[in-house]
Image (tube, helix red, strand yellow):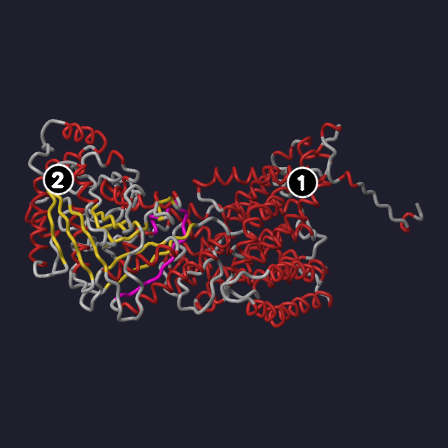
């Protein structure tokens, strides 16, 4: 035994990695690779299940990831010795933890790539003050808590213990906060911008404190070696900024514009991530700090987009959850026993939250931020996540925290983050500012006044036709168009989705990711149109939401900006052979939600392009041939109001085709098939159908009055052609539409929701997309071989009296609008005509 120190014995067998198979009598759990695969599978399945369970409670994904590890760890399933020894034996922990830290390394690199330091500089002094005030009180509470727990950890220097607990309680998780703000619809609000910028500054402070804490912990004292750690870390930061950043910029310059980054350069950068992690770990700082700093020096632009697109799904979906799950596996909640321990735990949670809220609230009040907004801001700053988990894990690995202290702090982090959304939802409900505005329809918008509309865009492909549509809407000095362009981006829960900086069109910076690159491409196109077209203002906005709630963002912008018309793209696009194919089924659900509850009129644009060519110069504009199909009803009158506006453009020609019921057609108010159809419809829509029948004569009077007014105003305009087609049934209507001159490049039609007429009888029976109405669906179908675009218009009919009734929030119990069947109550004919007559 005396010579044992001079000998090195290594036991290794290749068969320890992979098994020969169960048919050879091998147990796969005795081998590292199949065991690792099973562990990853269990962790991912458990986390995904928890994400599904906690989704109704709007909990951040980090909560599910930590709880997944807690469930699999000694707190629950790990209580079974058989489960613990077979599935998570001690010999496998090192492999699992190594892979988790590799995922953490690359995730922090991606966070650095996407993080925008310019956001902090642009938010002003109050962001710095709010961030610092939100850190001081929790840090002091962490100091007090350290004194309480230090009795059981006497082998650790008190200063180190204080620093770790202070950092863990005082910082704010930037990525977690961004996800919470997005789900609460606060990401683009003033309070959301303050919270994001404060959290970003908070995170940077946390990294500095973490580097100091690790340096002290590993050297156990403030000795000369600790000073060398801090100095060498600073030297590494300077090296990255002054040496590595110019090298990466040189790589970007060597890549021709529009071409992909070379595979060689991508491999060099990924190698640089690992080298940075190795260097910082070797000098005494955590390896993820090096990866984070290296990510920060990567310039914005195509190289950042490429790195994010290639790494993010794999890192955030597979490797990163391992790190959080390992934290849960290390947590043994059974160690938190006794009334005194639980009392301390509850006290720490309350005091830590109260400290963050109090510090933030006081500064907010100083800067004259309203009380409830300041309170909400303080609660939001309590979000915990990645940095805190790194601090706690490093503290446990360095024996700064014992198992009991670690478990207590894990519970503190979970509870502080989990309570944010429920509390904020209850105390702060900005909702939509329900400010009454009268001009919610095109008819109510003054012909010689500002025309406000909201344009929704999913992809750049939607842009050219929408620009031509805006141009055709006749913006003039007396009737300018104020357009709000809303780029709709899905919130996927990944880092790139929640770290996008919005409205960067004037920043002069390159995009950080694909979504932002698309936004800039879209906004640049509209900006060019704004500069060339004249009398059109473009206000770019970006909404980042899950598809299930994206319509709420559309409503919010529409109400805030008081627009009269919303344009949304159809969920199908034209193929090369002229057919129509669906792009994303979620787009159709968004359109249906907008039609059901929109606060103003809505138009669905079926994009087949416009025949008018692009402008060669600022003074050369496209010539558009527009056709309006008029069947009667509020939607058709709204479509005519838009076509009327287009007809005043000197380069547009308008054909109005009114379909009139022939004398031999069946009466809709008497027996027969139509009466049966009405009866069947009454089963589905209730009182709405009854309203259609009782208002039928009044609707006809309003249609005729509006037609007469239009014809009187355009009788001397040679570019406007009015024709009437007498038809008796749906087949004749289809034949008449097919006979229309093919030179037209856009058809404008009313959706006709709630209207029943023999002119369109039978057409809706074969509708693929009922949201377009019978005629809109016919024109948009693949069977109807056409090359023109179609705009299907639905008029806002939520007005009562003089149109000042405001729809409530979709979440409010008193607000219910039947999908595709909302009808307004009957009004006297004089009042109806006063409401729907365009005001000169």
The residue wearing badge 1 is: 36
Residue at x 49%, y 62% (from the top left corner): 131
State the image coordinates of residue 319 (x, y, percent, origin top left): 60, 47
Residue 538 within the segment the image draws in magenta: yes
Residue 78 within the segment the image draws in magenta: no
Question: Is disc 2 placed on a helix, strand or loop?
Answer: strand
Depth check: give the residue in front, 580 or 167: 580
The residue wearing badge 2 is: 727
* 1 or 2: tag closer to the N-terminus: 1
Real-space Cα separation, disc 1 to disc 2, in angstroms: 73 Å
Residue at x 28%, y 57% (from the top left corner): 611
Q: Is residue 159 visible?
A: no
Q: Residues within 10 Å of mark 1 (few under 14, many from 20)?
A: some
Q: From the viewer's perspective, tell me whether residue 213 is left or right of residue 466.
A: right
State the image coordinates of residue 88 (x, y, percent, origin top left): 67, 38
Residue at x 23%, y 40% (from the top left corner): 774
Which range is magenta? 536-553
Residue sitting farthest toward the bottom: 242
Residue sitting farthest toward the right: 2
């Amino acid at each position: 035994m005396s010579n044992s120190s001079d000998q090195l014995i290594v036991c290794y067998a290749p068969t320890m990695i992979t098994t020969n198979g169960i048919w050879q009598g091998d147990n796969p759990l005795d081998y590292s690779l199949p065991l690792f695969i099973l562990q990853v599978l269990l962790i991912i399945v458990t986390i995904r299940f928890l994400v599904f369970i906690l989704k109704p409670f709007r909990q951040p994904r980090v909560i599910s990831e930590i709880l997944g590890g807690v469930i699999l760890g000694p707190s629950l399933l790990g209580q079974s010795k058989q489960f613990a020894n077979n599935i998570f034996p001690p010999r496998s922990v090192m492999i699992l933890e190594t892979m988790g830290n590799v995922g953490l390394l690359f995730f922090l690199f991606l966070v650095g790539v996407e993080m925008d330091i310019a956001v902090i500089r642009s938010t002003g002094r109050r962001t710095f003050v709010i961030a610092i005030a939100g850190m001081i009180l929790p840090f002091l509470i962490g100091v007090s808590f350290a004194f309480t727990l230090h009795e059981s950890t006497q082998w650790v220097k008190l200063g180190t213990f204080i620093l770790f607990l202070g950092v863990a309680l005082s910082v704010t998780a930037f990525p977690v906060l961004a996800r919470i703000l997005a789900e609460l619809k606060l990401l683009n609000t003033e309070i959301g911008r303050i919270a994001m910028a404060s959290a970003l500054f908070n995170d940077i402070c946390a990294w500095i404190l973490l580097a100091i804490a690790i340096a002290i912990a590993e050297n156990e004292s403030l000795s000369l070696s600790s000073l060398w750690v801090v100095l060498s870390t600073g030297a590494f930061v300077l090296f990255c900024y002054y040496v590595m950043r110019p090298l990466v910029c040189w790589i970007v310059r060597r890549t021709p514009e529009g071409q992909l980054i070379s595979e060689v350069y991508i491999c060099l950068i990924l190698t640089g991530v690992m080298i940075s992690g190795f260097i910082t770990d070797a000098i005494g700082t955590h390896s993820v700090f090096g990866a984070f700093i290296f990510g920060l020096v990567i310039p914005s632009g195509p190289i950042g987009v490429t790195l994010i697109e290639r790494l993010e799904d794999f890192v955030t979906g597979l490797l990163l959850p391992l790190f959080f799950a390992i934290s849960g596996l290390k947590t043994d909640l059974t160690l938190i026993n006794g009334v005194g321990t639980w009392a301390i735990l509850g006290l720490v949670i309350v005091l830590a939250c109260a400290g963050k809220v109090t510090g933030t609230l006081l500064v907010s009040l100083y800067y004259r931020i309203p009380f409830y907004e300041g309170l909400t801001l303080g609660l939001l700053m309590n979000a915990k996540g990645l940095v805190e988990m790194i601090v706690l894990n490093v503290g446990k690995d360095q024996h700064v925290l014992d198992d009991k202290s670690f478990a207590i702090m894990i519970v503190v982090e979970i509870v502080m983050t989990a309570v944010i959304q429920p509390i904020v939802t209850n105390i702060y409900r900005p909702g939509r500012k329900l400010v009454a505005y009268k001009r919610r329809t095109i008819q109510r918008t003054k012909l010689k006044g500002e025309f406000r509309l909201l344009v929704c865009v999913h992809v750049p492909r939607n842009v050219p036709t929408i620009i031509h549509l805006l141009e055709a809407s006749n913006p003039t000095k007396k009737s300018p168009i104020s357009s709000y362009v809303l780029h709709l981006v899905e919130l996927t829960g990944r880092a790139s989705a929640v770290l996008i900086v919005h409205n960067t069109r004037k920043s002069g910076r390159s995009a950080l990711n694909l979504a932002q690159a698309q936004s800039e491409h879209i906004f640049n196109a509209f900006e060019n149109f704004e500069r060339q077209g004249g009398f059109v203002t473009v206000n770019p906005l970006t909404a980042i939401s899950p598809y299930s709630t994206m319509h709420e963002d559309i409503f919010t912008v529409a109400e805030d900006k008081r627009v009269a018309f919303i344009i949304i793209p159809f969920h199908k696009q034209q193929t090369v052979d002229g057919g129509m194919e669906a792009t994303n089924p979620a787009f159709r659900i968004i359109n249906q939600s907008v039609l059901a509850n929109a606060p103003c009129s809505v138009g669905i644009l079926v994009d087949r392009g416009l025949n008018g060519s692009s402008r060669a110069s600022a003074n050369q504009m496209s010539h558009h041939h527009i056709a309006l199909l008029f069947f009667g009803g509020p939607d058709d009158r709204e479509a005519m109001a838009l076509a009327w506006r287009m007809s005043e453009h000197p380069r547009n020609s308008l054909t109005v085709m009114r379909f009139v019921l022939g004398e031999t057609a069946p009466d809709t108010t008497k027996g027969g098939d139509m009466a049966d159809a009405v009866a069947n419809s009454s089963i589905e829509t209730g009182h709405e159908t009854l309203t259609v029948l009782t208002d039928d004569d009044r609707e006809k009077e309003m249609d005729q009055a509006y037609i007469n007014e239009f014809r009187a105003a355009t009788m001397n305009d040679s570019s406007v052609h009015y024709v009437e087609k007498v038809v008796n049934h749906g087949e004749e209507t289809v034949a008449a539409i097919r006979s229309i001159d093919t030179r037209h490049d856009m058809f404008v039609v009313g959706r006709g929701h709630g209207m029943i007429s023999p002119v369109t009888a039978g057409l809706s029976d074969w509708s693929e997309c009922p949201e377009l109405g019978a005629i809109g669906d016919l024109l948009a179908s693949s069977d109807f071989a056409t090359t023109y675009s179609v705009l299907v218009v639905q008029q806002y009919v939520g007005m009562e009296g003089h149109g000042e009734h405001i729809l409530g929030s979709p979440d409010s119990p008193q607000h219910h609008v039947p999908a595709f069947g909302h009808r307004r109550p009957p009004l006297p004919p004089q009042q109806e005509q006063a409401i729907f007559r365009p005001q000169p």
